Image: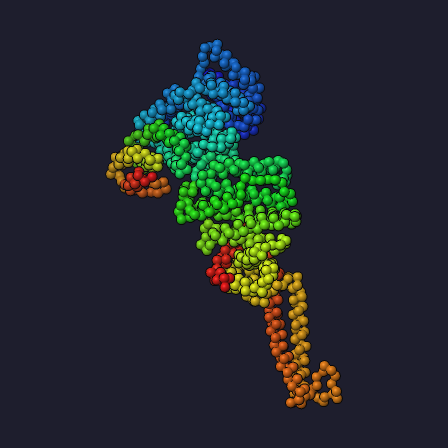
Amino acid sequence: MRRTMKLALGAAPMLLALQLSGCASDEGPGGTEAAQQAAIEETALGGEALSQRRTDLMRAWRDLIHLDETMQGLSDRNDSRSVVLLDNFIAEYMARHLEPLLAPDWQSSHPEVMALDANLRFMKAQLLANMRYTRKVQESIDDLEKRFEGRENMLVEYPVGEQRSLGEALEMLRDQKWNS
Amino acid sequence: MTTMMKGWRQSGLGLRLARLALGFALVLAAGALGGATTARSATWDDYLDYAYIYSSADAQSLAARIAGYEREVGLSLDAYVKRSLEDRGAKNGEDLAQTRRRAIAQFLQYLAAREPAHLENSVDTIEAFSDGKSRQEDRYWYHYIQAHRALERGSDTEFVKHVLSLWMDVVVPLESPFDTLQALSLSQAANSGFVSALPYVYENVARLILLRSQEMGMGFGLDSLAAIVRLLGDQRVGAYPEVIPVEASVRDYLERIVARLEGPESDGGSLTFTLVLFEASKAHDKSRGLLASEGFSDESVASIRAAGAAYARAADLAETPSGEAAVYMRILRQMGEVHAAKQRLGVDPDVELPFTIEGAYQVYASLHEARNGDWRELGFRNSGEESYLLSMRALWEEIQEATLNSADYYLARATEDPARAAELVRNAARLFARYLAHFERYAVADSTRWVPDSAYFAAYEAARGYGDAFIAYGIANPAPAEIQLAASRYHMALRAFPFDRMLWPALTTALERRGGANDFLAITRPIAEHVAGSRHAGSWIAQNGAGSKTIDVYRRALSDELVLMYMGFADAKGLGELEKSLADLKQQRDGLARKLTGLAEQRSGRGGSPPASPADGEMSETAAFGTSESQRVARELEDGGRQLAKLDKQITARARALPLFRAVVESEDLAPALRSQREHPMHTLLRRLYHEGSGRETQAADE
C-alpha cells in the first residue's frame, strides 16, 4: 500500500511534466496523447493517475452520449450533410482520443475503473451501431467478449440509464448491430 | 516565449490581467489595468498572449479596451502590426510566437472595427499554422480566426469544420492536462502555459457558436455543432467560477439553448432552428416592449414586422411538427398581442404578419394523427411523450387565445365602422366557427391528454361570440341560416358554460328571431337537468371547489322549471316587477278568498236578513236553494274555488322561484376569472360537466 502511494505521488508530477511538455511541443496533439498514454501505462495503478484516468473515462463516456444523441437527431432529420461532418468528427475523435484511452489492458481488470471501461466500450459500440458501422460494432463485441471473459455477471450501464449484466448487455448489443 | 513575457507571467501580472479581464463585459476600469502594469512597462506582446481572455467582447467594448492598451503601451495596434512586419523583413524571418501575435493583432483590429480587410490580413498571417502539427495555442487561433472568416463569408460548412477541428485539436488534448493542473492547484499558475486557457476556450467557443454566428446571420447549416453545444453544457462552460465568474459566463444562455434542443420546443435537435427561434423570440420581446411603451410607433411597427420575419425564417427551417408547433405558439401569441393592442389603442395600422391561424390548426392535426406512437417521428424522440402532449396542449391554448383576440378585434372594429360592420362581424364569426369546428373534432371525452381544460371555456366564448355576432351586434339582414346557426351556437355555449346568466335570454332572443321562442324550454331543459343533476357539480360543491357558491345557486335554480323560464324570458332589471307581481297575486288571492267566504256564508244562510233590494254587484246574503240565485252562488263558489287553487299554486311557485332567480342574478360572475386564468381549477369542472352524460344530452337535442 505504501509502495502504491509512493508510486502515485511520484507519478503525478511526472504526468504533469509530460502533459505540459506535450502541450508546448511541436509534435502536435497526437504526440501529446501518446506520451500521456505511455506514462499512464507505466504508473497507472494508483493515486492521482488512477483518479485522472477515472475522470477521463467518465468524460469520454458522457461525450459519447452527447455525440450519439446529436447523431440520432441528424439522422432522424435526414440531414446528410451534417451527418457527414459529425461522422468525420467522431471517427477522428475515436482514432485520436478514444482508442488510446481504451488501449490499456489493465483498466479492463482494475476494480476501480473496469466498470467505467466497460461502460465506455459499450457506449462506443452503441454509437457505432447507430452510425451503422456493423463491422466495427462486431469488432467491439469481440473485444468486449475477450476482455471480460468469465465476468459476464459484472454490472454495466447499457443502454444509458439501465443497469444489467455484461452478458445480457452483449446480447442486446448484438441485436442492436442489425436493428439500429 | 520572450524573457519579458516570462518575467511578466512570473511576476503574476499575467494572472492579474486574466482575473481583471474576466467576464467579457469588459466593465473593468482601464485604470486598474494601468496600475497593474506600471511596475513594468507593458508591451503588446503581453496583451496579445492573453487575447483569448478578452477577444469575445463586443466590438465597442473591445475597441475601448484596445485604445486603453495603446495608451499604456504607447503604440497603436496598427503600428505594432507594421513594426512587426518590418522586423520580419529586416531579420528575414521571425519567431512563430511573433507570427501568432501579429495574426491576433490583425484579428483584434477586425473584431474592434468589423473591417473584413483586417480579417483577411489575419487569415493570411495565421496560415503559417495550417499544417495541423502546431502547438495547441497556435491551432486555437488558427481555427478561431478561420471560423470568423467562414462567418464573414457566410460559409456554414467551413465554419462548422473549423469549430469541430478546434475542439479536436485544442480542447480534447488540453482537458486531461488541465484536470491534472487543477488537482495540483496549478491550473492558474503563472507558468502553466496555454493549458490554463481552457476555461476561456470553452467560453469563446460557446460564444462563437451561440452568439457570434447569429450576429453574423448564420441561420443555416449549424446542426452538427449541436454536439459541441451539448459537450460545452456538460460541466464545461461555467464550471470554473474561480476563473470566469458565473455571472460573466455565457452558461445561462447555453443551458437554455441545450434545454430547448432537448425539450418540447426542439425541431428534432436542430441547433440552427433553436438559435434562429431564440433570436426571433428576442426580437419578439423587443417589439412587445416597444408596443407597450410607444404603442404603434413607426419603430414598434418595424420591430413587429422584423419579429414576424424572424419567426418566418424559423418556420422555414422547421422540418418536424414539433418545430412548427414551437414557432406557431410564438407567432400566435404575437398575433394576439397585436390585435389586443389595436383594440385597446383604437388604432389600426397595417401590421401584416406572415402567418395565419389556419397553419397552426394544420400543425395540431399532424400532431394529433401521431398520438398512437408515431409522435416519436415528429421530433419528440429525445424529449419524450410528455413533451409531445405538452406541445399539443400549449399549441391549442395559443390557437384559442389568438382566435378569441382576433375575433374580438373584428367585433370591436365593427362597432366603430358601421359601413363595414357586416363584413367585420362575419370575419369574427368565421374565426369563432373555425375554433368550434376544431373543438368539436378533437375535444372528445378521452382527449384529456392533448386538449387543455381551458378549451371548454374558450368554446363557450367562441360559441357565444358567434351568436352575439349575428344577434347582439345587429348585422343588417342576417341570413336565416346565420340566425339558425347563432341559436345553435348559443345552445352549445350553454352546454360548455351554463353559469352565464345573460346567455339564457340571448338564446331566447335568437329563437325569437327565427320565430321559435316556444322552443326555449325544450332546448334548455336537458341542459338545466344536466346541471341540476350533475354528479361532478355536486362533488365539486361538497369539496368547496372554486366557484362553488355560484355553481350551487345555479344548480338549485335550474332544477326549477319556472326559474328556467325566468332565466330565458325575465330581465334582471324587472326582478322588482316580478316580486311586485307576486305581491299583487297575493292581494288578488286574499280578495278572492274573502269573496268566496261571503258567498259561502250567504249560501248557508248565516248572513242575517237580506236587504229589501240588494244593490247591483252585491250578492244576496241569503239564497233559497233551488232558485236561480242559489244556482248562481253555487257556480261562483265553484269557479272561485278553482281560481283560488290556481292562485295558490302560482303564489307557491313564484314564492319558491323568485328567490332562486334573485340568487342567480346576485351570484358572482365566474367568467372574468376563467377568461384571465388558463389554469383556473374550474376549467377542469367545465370539462367534466361537458362530457358527463353527453350522450343523453345529444339524444335529447336530436329528439
Q: Position of residue B268 (x, y in %)?
A: 43, 39
Instruction: Return the x and y of residue B477 as percentages of the image width and height.
Output: 62, 54
| Residue under the image location 66 percent in, 78 percent down | B592
Which image quadrant is residue B634 in?
bottom right
Q: Quadrant of residue B629?
A: bottom right
Residue A55 placed where, x, y %?
37, 33
Depth order, front residue of B384/B304: B304
Residue A10 seen by the camera: no
- For the residue pair B533 and B544, the one nearer the viewer reads as B533
The residue shown at (56%, 29%) is B27
Which quarter of the figure is the N terminus of chain B placed in? top left
- Is residue B581 something that shows in the picture? yes
Image x and y of residue B379, in percent = 43, 41
In this view of the protein, which residue sits in the foreground, A144 or B377? Answer: B377
Classify B501 as above or below B82.
below
Q: Residue at x 48, y 41 (%)?
A: B324
Q: How many marks?
A: 0
Q: Is residue A119 above or below residue B425?
A: above
Q: Which residue is at 58% across, 65% downward?
A: B518
Name, please, the residue furthest toward the left. A150
Please, which colouring scheme is shown?
rainbow
